[in-house]
Image (cartoon, rainbow, N blue to C red):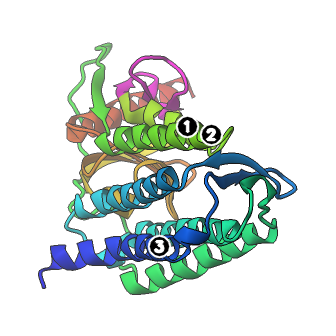
Amino acid sequence: MSPVRRRALVVTLPFALAWAVVLAVFTRLRDRLPDPLATHFGPGGEADGFTGPGAFLSVASAVLIGSGLLIALGVLRTRTALRAQRPVVAIGYGTAGLLGYAFASLLFANADAVRASRVSEPVWQLGVAFGVACATGALGWLIAGRDTAPEDGPEGSAAPARLPLADGEVATWTRTVGSPVLLFSGVGAVLVGAVLAAVGPGVQAWLIVIGLISAAPARCRVTVDRRGLTVAPWFAPWPRKRIPLARIERATSGAANALSLGGWGYRITGRGSALVFRSGDALFLRLATGREFAVTVDDAATAAALLNALIERERGTSEQRG
């Protein structure tokens, strides 16, 4: 089996198994289920949202298959070994376990009910669902293998370079970078949340919020100038990430894999933080605190060279004033 097919099998397997379990439980209990089903429960466990059996199976299938495709898309966009993608694989396995248990337990709760309004779901089922998620997530972590991502920075990073700037010369570098993964996952979460919210009042409305938060930074403008580095959404000046020149020790550039930086979006890593839009060219900053900051953007070498020139000028001006 080729590495790509093996990765695809490993990543999609838990979602396929979860969907098969839900389908098997639905088929077994079909004649014992009320119509409609109780599909949402209040804080006390009482049913307050209902949908037909066919619609429930369609939504459950869409959520499980869609989630599996999203995770697989993220993993298979790169040729990096699974051991370097353990967090994503573990999240995928945990998500499959959580969703599979939640959908199956809901079907068992509805079995033999005379009316869906009398169905209840104990709160402790939520704890069991998260326990299953932790167990399956740990399994995914083990299957992915030991993470051997480099600890000393990106492979192939270039040595610090400087643009030749004349005294008093002003220079600005700016690029717009987009993330299809963030946009796709954000829009997908909004659509799934909208479908689930239509099934029952307030059902999974938080997915819509998460989707909007994910999609908002899917396209940003990265700017280097006398103020330092600024990253902000292309359509608004806020929220933004700004690192002044005084906080930057040096800048380098190099190729980076999105998953080696922790995944897409704003990530906290063992060495610092990163804004990850996609794999490829990236700008890496060594901060005065000893931490690092990275942002994936095209033409990062020019951005690094300009930053180093501006840093050198800033320090020279500070020394003259001192």
The residue indicated by pointer 1 is: 208
Task: Label 1, secondary structure: give it.
Answer: helix
On screen, residue 86 versus residue 51, left or right, reads left
- Mark yes or no: residue 76 visible: yes
Q: Is residue 193 above or below residue 35?
A: above
Give the number of the disc on residue 205: 2
How many other residues sit within 10 Å of disc 1, few (<14), some (14-19) or many (≥20)? many
Q: Are marks 1 and 2 in contact (CB under 8 Å)?
A: yes
Task: Label 2, secondary structure: give it.
Answer: loop
| Viewer-side residue, 161 vs 156 | 156
90 within the magenta span: no
In which image quadrant can residue 234 be found?
top left
Mark 1–mark 2 Cα distance, whole angstroms, equals 6 Å
The residue at the far left in this view is 2
Mark 2–mark 3 Cα distance, whole angstroms, equals 28 Å
Q: Mark 2 belongs to which amino acid?
A: Ala
Indicate the quadrant containing the C terminus: top left, top right, bottom left or bottom right.
top right
Q: Position of residue 8 (x, y in %)?
A: 25, 72
Residue at 31% x, 14% y: name it.
Answer: 170
Q: Mark 3 belongs to which amino acid?
A: Thr
The part of the chain drawn in magenta is 221-245
Q: Earlier in the sequence, mark 1 or mark 3?
A: 3
The residue indicated by pointer 3 is: 27
Q: Earlier in the sequence, mark 2 or mark 3?
A: 3
Residue at 26% x, 77% y: name it.
Answer: 9
